[in-house]
Image: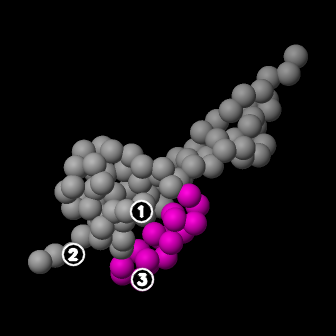
Amino acid sequence: MIIFGTKGYLYQLAILTLVCARCGNPAAHTLRKRVTKFTLFFVPLFPFSTKYTTQCTFCGAEQQMTREQAEQLQAQEAGGQAYGPAGQQPYQRP
């Protein structure tokens, strides 16, 4: 008997202040990495799916992005700058 399946892992990479594409409010967005791994006898062996998303903390809208976009957001966040993925505008205080 062989027991196999999947297990999901969720990593929070950063918290950014962006203008939400859905609600239009400047709010904190969490940048997350979701990894699904194949398991054999409950031991995770290798990842077969990796997805990056941002989620608005104001309205809860979630938007998927590519790995390159997520890395660019992280790099700009580390440098003190933030911008919105896929057409979102950065939040700048008046």
Name the residue type under label 2. Answer: Gln
**In the image, is residue 89 above or below residue 32?**
below
Q: Is residue 68 visible?
A: yes
- Give the numbered dot on residue 34: none
| First in residue order: circle 1 vs circle 2 | 1
Q: Residue at x 58, y 61 (%)?
A: 67
Disc nearest the viewer among 2 and 3: 2
Residue appearing at x 42%, y 49% in the figure: 63
- Residue receiving disc 2: 92
> Mark 3: few, some, or many residues within 10 Å (few <14, many ≥20)?
few
For discs 3 and 1, the disc positioned in front in the rendered view? 1
Would you say the residues marked 2 and 3 are in contact, meaning their CB atoms lie under 8 Å apart? no
Whether the magenta-drawn stretch holds residue 76 is answered as: yes
Name the residue tied to disc 1.
85
Q: In the image, what residue occupies the spot 43% across and 77% down?
A: 76
> What residue is pinned by disc 3?
79
Helix, strand or loop under label 3: loop
Q: Which residues are magenta?
A: 66-81
